[in-house]
Image (cartoon, rainbow, N blue to C red):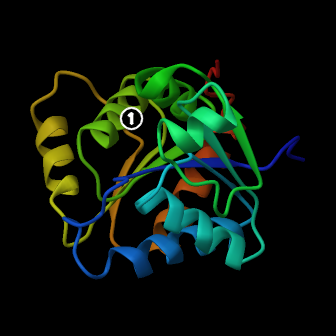
Amino acid sequence: MKASKITIAVSGAADIAHCGPSVIPIAKELGREIARQGCQLITGATSGFPMYTAEGAKEAGGFSFGLSPAASKKEHLETYHLPLKAMDTVIYTGFGYPGRDLMLVRSADAVIIGCGRIGTIHEFTVAWEANMPLGILVGEWPTDEVIRNIIDNSNRQNDGVIFESDPKIMVSKLVAMINKREENGEINIRL
């Protein structure tokens, strides 16, 4: 019997203008699937892809929390100009984006990468180096191709990487991988 729900981090662009017209429905469906499959969602408490994923999770009755780069609610809203929408809880880290990214990834059992840019790639590399289960959402954006290139040219292995375009299949495969790793006594060491 599990002590707690599986926590899935979702990483993606705060500004989704470059992601194509299907990005919002896909992000929302990803959030709904995370909730439907009994998992909780954690994001970087930002706009764009992560926010729409959180909205989808909330639509399906899921729990969503965010890790903010800001040190306070005031800083979150006024300095970083980030939303509070669709999150049940926000933790104000005060660590800026790099520290927040590390905490986000290491607070999860798995990470799903959507359409993104440099911050998303940063979160991917943290998860990759930690040998975490990783889902790379394939879409009309180039992020999945960039990550595939990074993996193909790396000198490290991570057998837990899934490339998938269907959010339902993606979440299902990650949940199965997490459960198998736990059954085998493999755990993610969290911060």
Q: In which quarter of the image is residue 160?
A: top left
Q: Where is residue 188 in the image (x, y as percent from the top left)?
A: 61, 27
Against 165, is 66 above or below?
A: above
Q: Position of residue 189 (x, y in %)?
A: 63, 20
Q: In which quarter of the image is residue 31?
A: bottom right
Q: Which of 89/161 is in front?
A: 89
Q: In this view, does 133 lie to the left or right of 34?
A: left
Q: Is residue 69 left or right of residue 181?
A: left
Q: Is residue 168 left or right of residue 180?
A: left
Kind of element beneath mark 1 = helix
Q: Which of 84/178 is in front?
A: 84
Q: Can residue 78 be seen in this view?
A: yes
Residue drawn at 32 percent across, 30 percent down? 125
Against 122, is 189 above or below?
A: above
Task: Name the amino acid type tagged 1.
Answer: Glu
Residue drawn at 46 percent across, 56 percent down? 47
Q: Where is residue 28 in the image (x, y as percent from the top left)?
A: 51, 75
Q: Write down the residue under mark 1.
A: 123
Q: Is residue 108 visible?
A: no
Quadrant for the C terminus, please.
top right
Q: Position of residue 168 (x, y in %)?
A: 52, 74
Residue drawn at 84 percent across, 44 percent down? 4
Residue drawn at 65 percent across, 36 percent down? 74
The local crowd at label 1, few if under 14, some if 14 to 19, many if 20 or more residues have their Cα within 10 Å, is many
